[in-house]
Amino acid sequence: MVLTFFDKAGAGVLRALDTAGDFAVLAGRTFAAIFKRPFDVQNLFRQFQAVGINSLPVVILTSLAVSMVFAVQLAFGFKQFQAEGLASQVEGLAVMRELAPVITGLMLSGRVGSAMAAELGTMQVTEQIDALECLATDPIHYLFVPRLLASVVMLPILTAVSVYVGYWGGYLILVGVEGQSAYVFGNEFYKLLAFRDLRIALYKAFVFGMIIALVGCWKGYRTQGGAEGVGNAPTSSVVTSSLWILISDFFLTKLLLV
Amino acid sequence: MPVIDVVNLSKAFGPKVVLSDVNLSVEEGESLVVLGGSGTGKTVLLRNIMGLLTPDSGHVAVEGKIIGQLSRDELFQVRQSIGMCFQMAALFDSMTVFENVAFGLRRHQKMTEGQIQARVEECLSLVGMKGTDKLKPAELSGGMKRRVGFARAIALKPKILLFDEPTTGLDPVMTDVIGRVILDLKHELGVTTITITHDLKSAFIIADRIALLFRGECIACQPPAEFRDNPHPVVQQFLRGDADGPFLQDPPPPKRKEAHA
């Protein structure tokens, strides 16, 4: 029984290492393929549109909702200590440092990462990826690279949009509902922030973009087993990338705030 | 020197041996048809030739180059001289017919848009699909998809064409159409072809030689007339299309007597 336990544990460790190794190899091949020719500009712009432009409504709505609900909680909390003025400062800090990059990352992992996994998964089970290989085209170069580039460029831009929307979400609640002065809110929102905070938010978004694209493409590329496999790939992609976004957010925050 | 040389090729997936010591060679301009039951490794053979799978032992050489020993860039060079037609066409469903056929040209040839247009039209008319360039794969029937797949495969003017069960799932008329298209391509382009099929009628029309794979081994490889007279019981059973005989591993259900009124 003890031997069986060690057998199972060993097999589990080997499987986990195998999976991690496979991801690392594919990620390495993707980075190596970035500067390879031919540069497919049309394909790249299609991905910019899919990842960036088409995600704008989702990012705007979620950023607005989260910043508004956060402002409601802050206003309620600080009211207990007659410190309502602090609400806008903390709102600014939270939106810039955490809410904007993490909400954007999580929403895009659901919207874009899952789409990448489903698209590549369908291509895998319908032999379209084999067809690419047979047409002397590296699938990593043709499929992974534009998605990775689009994600690492568009995630920071969408995060900046999210910060901007977050400002107005806080404004709506704290100025519109709680009756704070618009002038004071405008000043207080940025009071605790430095340029470094925007830079950290954009770094985080860059890393989240990398995670979303690489995990989405990897899960799609390794899809097996027909319709069931294609169904599992997006779910698995969203769960994995969301998890890594949250884990890497902790380490990035610890690392970059020092 | 044979254009395609398959030497002692073996491939297994886990405990299941799919190909066992298969030897085949195809000369320039020759048309080889590979027959065999489902799961006998016909598609695996083609995937090994394309370098999509790595053999467990043995090797495949295309124009003298051993596929397993090539770097990825060298493999892509070799693949540009091979056109692969997939069983279900494997067209890129996000692209139109035109974009599908033009894909290889845009990636590998320095051609103007006008030249690409002309080449795509030429390829589509060779397979009888002229005028469909703006359609998406979802708007095509099974037979049309296969023919667009052929057009995509010949766009780069390959020296070798591989057809993976091009007639599976098609009605008898469309099967005949596909057979004729393959024959036309063979004569017009003078390419070396390997065709995997279950359709005996088109196999005997297309083939210069017919090979039969049985339980991972190549048990016959000879010209059609000799193949037809091959006394091997598996060959004869396959030609008869009879369930009784050594072909099936598990015995088939017994024949019932037809009830006459």
Image (cartoon, coloured by chain):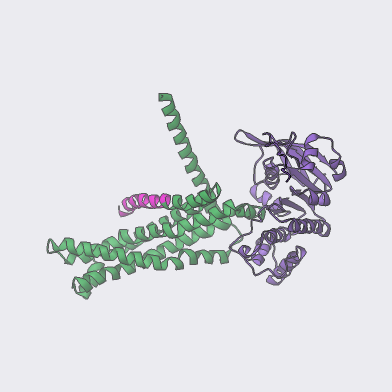
Chain colours: A green, B purple
- Residue A144 seen in the current view: no
Farthest residue, direction front: B261
Q: How many marks?
A: 0
Residue A240: in magenta span: yes
User: In what quadrant of the picture does the N terminus of chain B appear?
Assistant: top right
Is A36 positioned to the left or the right of B173 in the image?
A: left
Residue A79: in magenta span: no
Is A103 positioned to the left or the right of B238 in the image?
A: left
Above-or-below relation of A2 to B131: above
Counting from the top left corner in percent of width and height, residue A225 is at: 55, 46
Task: Report the magenta stretch's main SS.
Answer: helix
Closer to the camera in the image, B252 or B154: B252
Closer to the camera in the image, A156 or B124: B124
Which residue is painted at 16% across and 62% down in the image? A78
Closer to the camera in the image, A232 or A180: A232
Above-or-below relation of A90 to B33: below
Q: Magenta residues, as a range?
A: A239-258
Counting from the top left corner in percent of width and height, residue B196 is at: 74, 48
- Residue B137 seen in the current view: yes
Is B127 positioned to the left or the right of A244 in the image?
A: right
Occupied quadrant, residue A53 = bottom left
Counting from the top left corner in percent of width and height, residue B12 is at: 64, 36
Which residue is painted at 79% across and 42% down in the image? B240
